[in-house]
Amino acid sequence: MKGQPVPDSDHVARYCKAMTVENGEIQPTAFMMRQTEVYLSVNWLEELKCPDRAAQITELQKLYATKLKVGATARIAVLNVGTLRVKVERESPDRRVLPILHEPIIPDDPSHAGIYGILYDDREIIAELIAQVVLDNHPAQASRPAA
């Protein structure tokens, strides 16, 4: 449901362009908002209704392929919502609380969500903290079957 908070026990994933990845590692720049953005776009993994993480990633790869030009070295960052929120609240200078809300785009992207509360002026500090709690990362481009 639009505007529903994503539970702290759940996970979100962020598409990370190739230019924000260095030697397979996701850099803080992957979590920086543009000045015109209201929230940082992510996908709520549990909302995909898949049986496991591998299926969730496959579903995201398919979704990204339909709406983005997915680079060969682009990655998907996976984050636990609670860990992300606690890290930013404890370590940001102003003890920032980041609401993470469901922002479905129907029918194309029902798992879409947003990380709110990041201000353009302090996005570097928040991006650095978020990057520190990436659980794992996966290729954003689906692997091609061997010929």
Image (tube, rainbow, N blue to C red):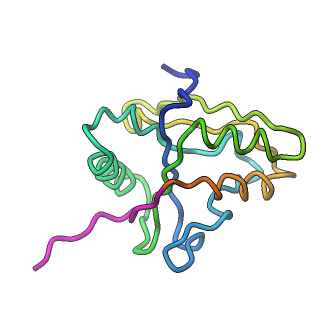
The image position of residue 107, as x and y in percent, is 37, 32
Magenta-drawn segment: 136-147
Q: Name the residue at the left extreme.
A: 147
Q: Quadrant of residue 25?
A: bottom right
Quadrant housing residue 147:
bottom left
Query: Predominant secondary structure in magenta?
Result: loop
Q: Is residue 76 above or below residue 144?
A: above
Residue sitting at x 71%, y 39%:
38
User: Is residue 79 rendered to the left or right of residue 100?
Assistant: left
Viewer-proximal residue among 26 and 87? 87
Q: Could you tell me how many numbered marks the image carries?
A: 0
Q: Residue at x 80, y 55 (%)?
A: 125
Q: Nearer the viewer, residue 79 or 64?
A: 79
Q: Is residue 67 left or right of residue 51?
A: right
Q: Position of residue 120 (x, y in %)?
A: 81, 50
Left/right placement of residue 69 relative to residue 62 reads right
Q: Name the spot of residue 51 as percent of width and height, x first.
A: 25, 37
**Position of residue 105 measured from the top left corner of the image (x, y, whole percent):** 46, 33
Q: Is residue 140 above or below residue 54?
A: below
In the rendered image, residue 127 lying in the magenta stretch gets the answer no
Out of 89 and 115, give the one closest to the viewer. Answer: 89
Q: Depth check: 36 or 64 in front?
A: 64
Name above or below for residue 100 compared with residue 141.
above
Compared to 8, does 29 lie above or below? below
